[in-house]
Image: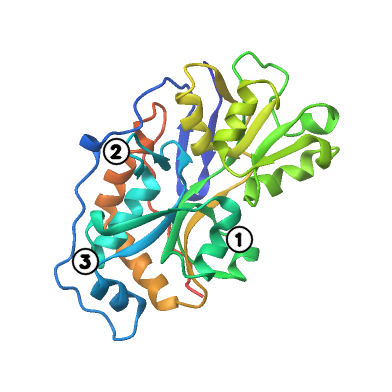
Amino acid sequence: MRLKKITAAAAGLGLALSLAACGGGSDDDTPEVDVAESPEFPEGSKMAELSEAGEMTVGTKYDQPGFGLLNLEDVPEGFDVEVAKIIAGALGIEPENISWQEAPSANREDLIEGGDVDMVVATYTINDERKERITFAGPYYVAGQQLMVMADNDEIDSPEVFQDNPDLKVCSVSGSTPAENIRQYLSNVNSQLVEFDIYDRCADSLSNGQVDAVTTDNVILVGFAAESDGEFKLVGEQFTDEPYGIGIEKGDTEFCEFINETLAENEDAYTEAWESTAGQYEGTETPTLPDADACA
């Protein structure tokens, strides 16, 4: 399958999308996480609370190859999962003491505000609307939105095609940034945009012909295409930049700064996390940790 090269310039990385299916990582490939011994934190801080408890709850995706996907033991694995483990390790929390909570796009803010999770690491694009409800650490990665179609589809090569062809349908996940971004390219949003709660359902709908394309961030689509045995392909160029952040309780700048500092101090672990997960797909390139935004 011959595809165009895309670039996520904000993170200085590219994906040469000539895909061949390859393993998305296994337990044997998972890097060991450094766990701090008896770390000390300011009294009353979120870090002190979690460190003293010796456990935490993390929200992540369960349906995104390379970033957050349930394995055969029903345990999530992927880049987001490994990033969360790095942060937990700096708190003195062992990986086995992390409780994982599925965090679909539409529910992420609710999970944080309701105290169901301590943080969300779930291909979570930083934007101003979400900042009204939560605080973001990061970004720790920058992706870009693209389109995935059936391998024999030569009609769709850009989002503009949907404007000229009102019968074409595109699928994305409700509550996601990609679902909002694609609307401007549709001539009839109500009839052309199909939304589900998880991307697995979008991929199934593409496979059975209910929709003509799936749109989300390219690194997520890379995983689906690579796992499809040649059924799917990515087309066109990326048409957005999507900075992924780590969602935490609104206003907790102390915890935000701790997360940013932890990732900056563990770039080798960050690289190993990528190369053992999303980096297992042929054509992906190892990212450089982006500069973190100011915590607010």
Residue lying at 64% horizontally and 20% vertically, measured from the top left: 208
Residue lying at 76% horizontally and 44% vertically, measured from the top left: 183
> Where is residue 262 drawn, in percent x and y?
30, 64
When the figure is inspected, residue 135 is found, relative to residue 234, above or below; the finding is below
Circle 3 residues within 10 Å: few <14, some 14–19, many ≥20: many
> Where is residue 194 drawn, in percent x and y?
72, 37
The kind of residue tagged 3 is Gly
CA distance for labels 2 and 1: 28 Å
When the figure is inspected, residue 115 is found, relative to residue 238, above or below; the finding is below
- Rendered image: mark on residue 276: 2
Disc 2 secondary structure class: loop
Q: Do the residues bearing badges 2 and 1 touch, measured as CB atoms within 8 Å?
A: no
The kind of residue tagged 1 is Asn
Q: Which residue is mark 3?
A: 92
Circle 2 residues within 10 Å: few <14, some 14–19, many ≥20: many
> Where is residue 227 drawn, in percent x and y?
45, 25
Q: Quadrant of residue 196?
A: top right
Q: Quadrant of residue 213?
A: top right
Q: Report the mark closest to the observer, 3 or 2.
A: 3
- Rendered image: mark on residue 127: 1
Disc 1 secondary structure class: loop
Q: Quadrant of residue 56?
A: bottom left
Q: Is residue 183 left or right of residue 68?
A: right
Q: Is residue 74 left or right of residue 183?
A: left
